Amino acid sequence: MSEDRESNELLQQRRLKLQRLREKGVDPYPLRAECTHSAAEALWMLQQWKEKGEEGGPPQVVKVCGRMMSVRVMGKASFAHIADGSGRIQIYVRLADDGVDEETYDLFKRDLDIGDIIQTEGTLFFTSTGEPSLRANKLTLLAKSLRPLPEKWHGLKDVETRYRQRYLDLIVNEDARRVFILRSHIVAALRRFMDSRGFIEVETPVLQPVYGGAMARPFTTYYHALDQEVYLRIADELYLKRLIVGGLDRVYEICKDFRNEGVSSHHNPEFTMLEAYQAYADYHDMMALAEGALFSVAQEVLGTTQITYQGQEIDLTPPWRRLSMRDSILEQTAIDIYEAPTVDVLRRQVEERGLQVDPQPTRGMLVGEIFSEYVEPKLIQPTFIIDFPVEISPLAKKKRDNPDLVERFELFIGGLEMGNAFSELNDPIDQRERFLDHAKQREAGDEESHPMDEEYVRALEYGMPPTGGIGCGIDRMVMLFTDQSSIREVILFPHLRTRSAPS
């Protein structure tokens, strides 16, 4: 029998059961349910009873609601497991005076299926084999499942199906649920850390008349009421720094950003960022903030700062290594970028060493490409790569002792870029000149060059104090803390190419 035919027959069987239930006067989709205990709470209560040395189980009647994940029908006594958001518990369904009546037992055997959501009311006990269980006195159907769960309850293996039908992934794969529960805890712990440092959480526009704050291609849309083209933000930076100008000295935002770029194991076009800005600070202060934040979150959520990522042991204990971009490239490629003052000279050095990198129009961009290809994957222990070329850092302050470089760092852990930070450029004249330089690059065909933002320059002209700023990728932080190699494993609904809905 073909898989499609078998699936259609199972669907038909469940629809017939639904019809039979309605003919019996059973509402297969009641309005609400009373759940007195979660599965985890019921198990905890039973364990407490046992630890007191009491026999049997607590006399209290409990009502646990959840999805049936397995069933074993055995004559007049049957077993099933139901699962809710806290875990799963075995239920014991017996046709007896201390169990269920004949009508309920018949419904359980004939009309309930794996995947159905039910309420079980009864008392807790341990079976003869020692398994904590709930003895059912009453069963109530809460939602009839018309489609069978994939591979029964053994799990969903097809990666694309897991992403497209994440609800199935969460039902049958405990590891997936664990990742997204941890994600929620990570974000909450990060907020607590930032709040404890005196930062206030703010919200800035998603739709922007001028996109900026990063070098990326935006998504474009149209605002009909204003007859105006607008962009989904690629970063929060320029609006958050306006707030620094306005006197909000410590601000942060956890939000969605959007970049119209390729999809990979480390990139999704829609992603979550933490951006934070602190007045009277520089990039050294941002290093301390990043160290403290990841160290604190790991301690709170994982209970340790010694983690394993993709087989590599990583220690998050501060202080972390600081390494200049020049030294990191020299270490891995034997190229000294200080001895290659032009893009042509740098290209020759790349070719002489047989290195394979995509051609880039400027020296700064070629430096960045060499770094991404040959250095980034080697940065396993927490490392701040500092002092970037000015050409690829239009919003950062120049170093006092070398105007070709800026006070910028990127943070790497486990070969992942985790964050990007500057001593923020607050000289409006310098900022305008850099925007103009990028405008020339745009005219030459570089779509990711930063556009001119006159309103932002106007804000700087009112005076912005010395400021440190940082952006950290939440998705990659979750990847690190949950040991996931793909960003799609930590985003509930990652972007996929549209296809027809499954039958």
Image (cartoon, rainbow, N blue to C red):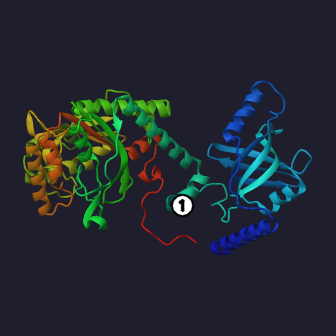
Kindly tell me whether residue 288 is visible in this rendering.
yes
Q: Is residue 84 left or right of residue 157?
A: right
In terms of image quadrants, where is residue 198?
top left
Q: Nearer the viewer, residue 304 or 353?
A: 304
Q: Nearer the viewer, residue 164 or 321?
A: 164
Mark 1, secondary structure of its residue: loop
The amino acid type of the residue labelled 1 equals: Gln
Q: Residue at x 77, y 24 (%)?
A: 52
Give the answer, above or below, for where 454 lies relative to 185.
below
Q: Is residue 35 left or right of residue 337?
A: right
Q: Is residue 46 left or right of residue 354?
A: right
Q: Residue at x 29, y 54 (%)?
A: 233
Residue bearing the label numbered 1: 165
**Which part of the image, by quadrant, shows the N terminus?**
bottom right
Give the percent coordinates (x, y) of residue 19: 76, 70
Give the percent coordinates (x, y) of residue 279: 23, 33
Q: Nearer the viewer, residue 384 or 55?
A: 55
**Which part of the image, by quadrant, shows the C terminus?**
bottom right
Q: Residue at x 81, y 57 (%)?
A: 108
Q: Residue at x 68, y 62 (%)?
A: 145
Give the percent coordinates (x, y) of residue 133: 77, 41
Give the percent coordinates (x, y) of residue 178: 55, 44
Q: Residue furthest top?
A: 52
Q: Residue furthest front?
A: 225
